[in-house]
Image (cartoon, rainbow, N blue to C red):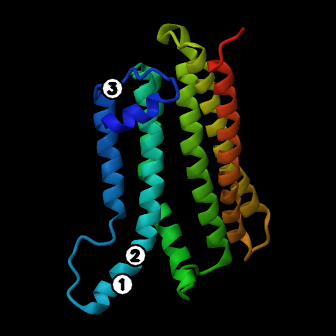
Amino acid sequence: MQALNEHLAKDGFRLRGTAMSRIDGFSDVVFGFAITLLVVSLEVPHTFEELNRSLRGFIPFAICFVILILVWYSHYKFFRRYHLNDSGTIAINALLLFVVLFYVYPLKFLFSVLTAGVLGDSGAFGTSAQMRELMVLYGVGFASVYLLFTALYWNAWRQRLTLTLNPTELFLTRSSMIEYTAMASVGVLSIAVATLTPHGYSGTAGFAYMLLVPIGQLHGRWESRKLKRLHTPHR
């Protein structure tokens, strides 16, 4: 954790939450339980066929694990920065944890289906409408997670005077709201594509998430330039 704290502090944001709080402890338990729900199988395989079937579940498990870790890291970063425990933060955090737990199985199912499709097994859906429902469900979950992160940062911005945020911290708070709103917008776009495309093509809504890469790069460059200007002494 010390290494993560040092990494976070490099952007100039003072870390107010270096000590473990009850919110951190409870949240980590929920994230740990969510990862447990992703486990391929708790039973040791007794035949090679069972082992082979378990190994097929490794790829979707790995993808879902990475996604959950990214969400956990965003959560970790927020609470290390602000160390808030007001009622608004608790309520938004509870909603975030609820969404994370609720969407574990749809997340695992989606990437299990995609992996099976690559391997030539595409019998998971009875009708094309079911694929549309799955993509809409995933999009709603994705957008909800990042809108809730936006809400957490907005709640911190609302308390900026109490937190005595300096100019760098004020900028990074606004920047985070912009970043998470943009990420949530990708989920909304995916929902729109899944809803508006003809039956049989709703799976193309997944390509909307490829926009996360250029959005992340553009936002990172913009943020770096702004931070450099903030840290450059005015003559």
Horizontal side of 189 relative to 144 (left or right) equals right
Helix, strand or loop at label 2? It is loop
Q: Are marks 1 and 2 in contact (CB under 8 Å)?
A: yes
**Is residue 116 among the parts visible in the rendering?**
yes
Please state if 82 lies on the left or on the right of 49 as rendered: right
The spot of residue 199 in percent (x, y) is 75, 74
Marks 3 and 2 in Cβ contact (< 8 Å): no
Please name the amino acid that badge 3 sits on: Thr
What amino acid does circle 2 point to? Gly
Instruction: Pinpoint residue 109: horizontal percent, then vertical percent.
Output: 48, 69
Q: Residues within 10 Å of mark 1 (few under 14, many from 20)?
A: some
Give me the residue at 39% from left, 22% from top. Answer: 83
Residue type indicated by callout 1: Arg
Whichever of callouts 1 and 3 sits on the residue coming sooner in the sequence is: 3
Give 142 or 177, whichever is nearer the viewer: 177
**Residue sitting nearer the eye, 195 or 156:** 156
Between the residue at mark 3 and the residue at mark 2, the CA separation in whole angstroms equals 37 Å
How crowded is the residue under tag 2: few (<14 C-alpha within 10 Å), some, or many (20+)?
A: some
Residue 219 quadrant: top right
Disc 1 or disc 3, which is closer to the eye?
3
First of labels 3, 2 by sequence position: 3
Q: Residue at x 32, y 66 (%)?
A: 39
Q: Which residue is mark 2?
A: 57
Percent across and percent down for residue 7 are 43, 35
Residue ID for mark 1: 53
Q: Is 135 left or right of 50, judged from the image as shown?
A: right
Labels in figure, total: 3
- Mark 1 vs mark 2, CA separation in Å: 7 Å
| Residue 18: mark | 3
* Residue 4 vertical position relative to residue 84 in the rendered view, above or below: below
Q: Secondary structure at mark 1?
A: helix
Q: CA distance from mark 1 to mark 3?
A: 43 Å
